[in-house]
Amino acid sequence: MVTPNSPRRAAWALHAAGRSLGLPERMDYNVALTFAGARRNSCSYQQPDRTSMSDKYDFDVAVIGAGPAGYVAGIRAAQLGAKACVVEKGDLGGCCTNVGCIPTKALWHAAGLMRQARHADDFGVDLTGVELNFPAVAAHRDAVVGKLRGGIKALLAGNKVALIQGAASFKDAHTLRVAGGDGGRDVSAEKLIVATGSSPVELPIVPFDHSVIISSDDAVRADQLPESIVIVGGGYIGVEFASIYAAFGVEVTIVEAVERLLPGIDEDCAREVVKVLKKDGVAIHTGTQLEGVGKGDGGVRARLAGGKEVAAQQILVCVGRRPDCEGLGIENAGLKVGDKGQLVVNEHMQTSQPHVYAVGDVAGDPLLAHVGSQEGIVAASHATGSITAAMDYRVVPACVFAFPEIATVGMSESRAAETVEQVVVKKFPFLALGKAHIMGQTGGFVKMVADARTGELLGVHICSAQASALLGEAALALRLECTADELAETIHAHPTLPEAIREAADGVTGFPVNWKG
């Protein structure tokens, strides 16, 4: 077996020594990892130093925003002994729960069921006459959102985090003015965490009217489907909506300014999704600028570069999201803003004012809910005394919920080539996997990127059915600095989709069994 150059191996030796001295197991391994240089974020088990908390404030920690970054920060601060509150001006759950991850995936799941129904006869199941009932789809979407909002409220209450309804803004560096909701009041705190999320970017040439020209926030809340739609922006948001609309029978056109869809995503993975989109009838215009929009006749006409026009019932503009600092009064707290409108932070999530933290989308890229939650944990831990708590962005999983799904973690081929002397890349096709044939989902692959010298895994990129469910193993493998040998020697149940991870690892080691490698 190839042994990677990993400080975690040394940490195990220190861990064993600590156990022999009678130290608590979780604590001594955490200390061992820290001394071995293998753990940058030791906030999980370190107890706070409560001597710094003061009685002169209403709260030890006040959080602005109850999205996946904010409510998690509030709960973790309370778990670590702080008197904490969360201030929210809208619905609990933030962008993710209300207009992002959750409702879009509810729509995507229904779209997937429609796709399966159309091919059910391939498996001997006659579903003739199956139709889409979009009002029922929307009702399910809203029910899921409502349940999760209620769950967040219960979690806050269960952890004794005060929930204050209203719009918060900085009165000074330690005081928030909360307007509306529970009524106007001032709230002071020794430490503050800003978690106000993001909002859709609006193009000057096509301002939102929230009826014909809509944002992703509008699209995900809609109770009716358009007959046709032009999607401006071919990033993951635009591609996900295109996949959903196409499955629901909407005529879809994508307009993307750069030369391919899903820029920043592994190109082989993006190519697989584009093939399916085209097969589903989606018209794709890449390397094409939107030059203007004309309204009329119950719809719009999109004017594209080169003189082409596309008529549709609606235009969905999804060219990104921007950090939301509007109305926060950040000038009253002396907070520094970056070139993209984000609050500038360090590895502890501290802003230019060390007692004020920023987490989630408002702190800038990557704008991912799960990253925001981890940032919230780091900020709350550091704010309550865990001085080593810091973010580590080396292993950040990301998914695109299209057909097929894309799931990716770690380095791309090009980034790996810049980092290590020699890279090995192997791509295992699902066409060679038994479970994929059972499901009738043989498209896609697992691409594994590794250091050719040590065998250490550097990146995993998956394009397949249920790719998002396979990503956890890959993320953990990268986090633990596993080698391809170690992954290949891990027995995987058969027949399952995760076997594809092992098969790809076999290819990296040079000993593929069920494919040519």
Image (spheres, rainbow, N blue to C red):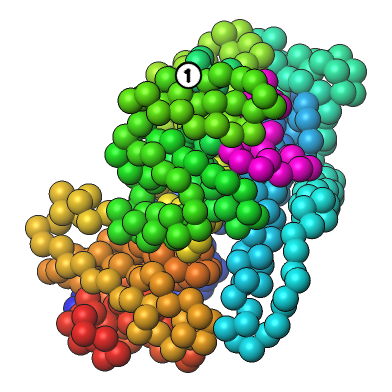
Q: Residue at x 70, y 16 (%)?
A: 169
Q: Position of residue 28 (x, y in %)?
A: 47, 65
Q: Residue at point 53% right, 20% down? A: 293
- Pinpoint residue 421: horizontal percent, then vertical percent: 9, 58
> Which residue, given by chain and number where applicable, does mark 1 sit on?
292
397 lies above or below 16: above
- Judged left or right of residue 245, residue 12 is left
- Residue 451 x/y as whole percent: 18, 65
Viewport quadrant of the N terminus? bottom left
Please check the rendered image and state whether residue 52 is part of the magenta-colored stretch, yes or no.
no
Residue 99, picture quadrant: top right
Residue 124 versus residue 470: which sits nearer the camera? Answer: 124
Numbered disc 1: secondary structure? strand
Residue, far front: 297
Q: Residue 143: x and y, percent?
A: 83, 53
- Count of all numbered marks drawn on residues in the image: 1
Q: Which residues are magenta?
A: 209-229
Residue 56 in view (yes/no): no
Residue 227 in view, yes or no: yes
Give the quadrant of the C terminus.
bottom left
Q: Quadrant of residue 360?
A: top right
